Image (cartoon, rainbow, N blue to C red):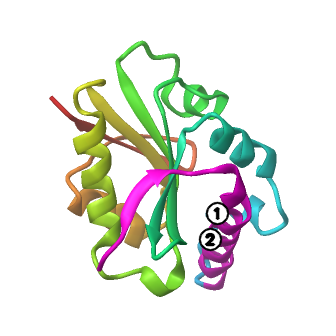
Amino acid sequence: MDYRIRVAICDETEPIRQILKENAVWFQSKGINQWSYLVDGGEYAEIHRAILSEETFVLDMDNKVIGTFTVSSKQSDWDREIWGESNAPSIYIHRLALGLDYKGNGLGLETLQWIEDNFADRVRYLRLDCVAHNQKLNQFYQNCGLTLIGQTGDFNKYQKLLH
């Protein structure tokens, strides 16, 4: 599959929102309560802020956004709630999603590998969280080499040592 990963631009706010929303609706259809706040448009201001801050990336195939993720080296309020206050040099991954037509073909693993390759020289840990009851997603992260290091509330915490 021929695609590239690059920093998102402001004009891509709506395609990014659409990918996130379609994933949230898909999760709900499977009985998984993940990103349900996105179904009704929640957190769109945060999504837009992350795009403006150049923390959001897209998978671009022929000038079409087919996936997205956000990477931050600063803890958000959410990160502090999940991980506690941390000074460990880390990147926090949020809203990693592919368009539904692009799931199941290895792009998720390739995306995580790209993140590792492009941030390993800057930080020590890759961190992310997901709802604990989403068994398929939890298994995916473990298959990608991330280690389950604990749970905060209903969320599992995954980490990978980058160097």
Q: Nearer the viewer, residue 136 or 88?
A: 88
Dot 1 surroundings within 10 Å: few (below 14), some, or many (20 or more)? many
Q: In which quadrant is the N terminus drawn?
A: bottom left
For residue 143, side relative to residue 21 (left or right):
left
| Badge 1 amino acid | Ile
The location of residue 127, given as percent across then percent down, is 38, 38
| Mark 2 in CB contact with mark 1 (< 8 angstroms) | yes
Residue at the far left in the pictured view: 163
List the residue tagged with mark 1: 16
The location of residue 105, given as percent across then percent down, is 30, 81
Magenta span covers which residues? 1-29
Instruction: State the mark number for residue 96.
Output: none
Q: In which quadrant is the C terminus drawn?
A: top left
Image vertical order of residue 25 relative to residue 153, above or below: below
The location of residue 112, given as percent across then percent down, is 31, 54
Q: Is residue 43 magenta?
A: no
List the residue tagged with mark 2: 19
Dot 2 surroundings within 10 Å: few (below 14), some, or many (20 or more)? many
Secondary structure of the residue carrying numbered label 2 = helix
What's the residue at 46%, 76% (across, down)? 62
For residue 157, side relative to residue 149 (left or right):
right
Q: Is residue 22 magenta?
A: yes
